[in-house]
């Protein structure tokens, strides 16, 4: 068989590695999954060991407003993904707009949730019983993650004022992954928080 009879091989495209920010976020979220797994596991362990959950004299959690707020927060995955897509296409204005919309809705969610959190603190305390302790720890941990996400969004809006770079695209990608994670956690946390009233 002659050399010319062999089929020519086309070179395969070289795989593109994920940016370091993506890997950093993936490792961070893996550790956060363990943290929230422990918190949720603790909640359910305590609940099944308790005779009364919540304890007598402790008001049951409100259902409607937390569910609405969680649905609104979860919906912010759409503008976050839109911002990432626009950034990948090099559309800076659309990236900024989608990120600003997400930030405004997420900040509103955060403000209302902090108001509810402080209102709950007037009704019972984290030191009064196991229910109060795990309730406020679980909600506080989730609220802290929302606050970090807000800071990331605000930082990228500020940085995008001077343009879009490959480095900023990687950071926006990592931030979008973070928000998808926080939104998924919001569903688990609110269903756990509201479980005594459901």
Image (spheres, helix red, strand yellow):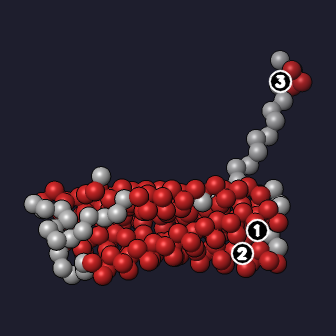
Q: Are marks 2 and 1 in contact (CB under 8 Å)?
A: yes
Query: What is the C-alpha distance between the residues marked 3 and 2?
Result: 54 Å
Q: Secondary structure at mark 1?
A: helix
Q: Which mark sits nearer the N-terminus, 3 or 1? A: 3
Picture layout, residue 177 above or below residue 146: above
Q: Residue furthest right?
A: 4
In this view, the residue in front, 186 or 105, is 105
Question: In terms of sequence position, does the residue under pointer 3 or pointer 2 come before the other?
Answer: 3
Judge whether 111 appears above or below 86 on screen: below
Q: Is disc 2 surrounded by few (<14), some (14 to 19) or many (20+) residues within 10 Å?
A: some
Does residue 38 appear left or right of residue 15 in this picture? left
Quadrant of the rendered image containing residue 103: bottom right
Q: CA distance from mark 2 to mark 1?
A: 6 Å
Is residue 187 visible in the rendered structure shown here? yes
On the rendered image, what quadrant is the N terminus found in?
top right
The residue positioned 83% from the left and 60% from the top of the image is 90
**Marks 3 and 1, Cα distance to the nearest angstrom?**
52 Å
Q: Nearer the viewer, residue 51 or 180?
A: 51
Q: Nearer the viewer, residue 26 or 11?
A: 26
Q: Residue beneath label 1, please?
A: 96
Callout 3–callout 1 Cβ contact below 8 Å: no
Q: Is residue 161 left or right of residue 25?
A: right
Secondary structure at numbered mark 3: loop
Residue found at x 51% / y 76%: 111
The crowding category of the residue bearing disc 3, from other C-alpha atoms within 10 Å (few below 14, some 14 to 19, many at least 20), is: few
Q: For marks 3 and 1, give the one nearer the viewer.
A: 1
Q: Which residue is mark 2?
A: 157
């Amino acid at each position: 068989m002659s050399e010319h009879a062999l089929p020519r091989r086309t070179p395969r495209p070289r795989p593109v590695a994920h940016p370091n920010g993506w890997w950093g976020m993936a490792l961070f979220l893996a550790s956060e999954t363990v943290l929230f797994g422990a918190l949720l596991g603790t909640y359910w362990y305590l609940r099944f060991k308790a005779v009364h959950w919540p304890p007598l004299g402790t008001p049951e959690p409100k259902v409607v407003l937390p569910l609405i707020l969680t649905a609104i927060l979860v919906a912010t995955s759409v503008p976050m993904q839109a911002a990432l897509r626009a950034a990948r296409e090099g559309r800076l204005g659309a990236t900024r707009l989608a990120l600003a919309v997400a930030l405004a809705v997420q900040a509103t969610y955060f403000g209302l949730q902090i108001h509810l959190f402080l209102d709950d603190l007037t009704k019972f305390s984290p030191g009064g019983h196991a229910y109060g302790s795990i309730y406020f720890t679980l909600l506080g941990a989730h609220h802290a993650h929302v606050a970090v996400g807000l800071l990331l969004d605000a930082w990228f809006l500020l940085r995008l004022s001077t343009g879009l770079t490959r480095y900023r695209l990687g950071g926006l990608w990592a931030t979008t992954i973070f928000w998808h994670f926080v939104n998924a956690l919001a569903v688990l946390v609110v269903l756990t928080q509201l479980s005594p009233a459901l």
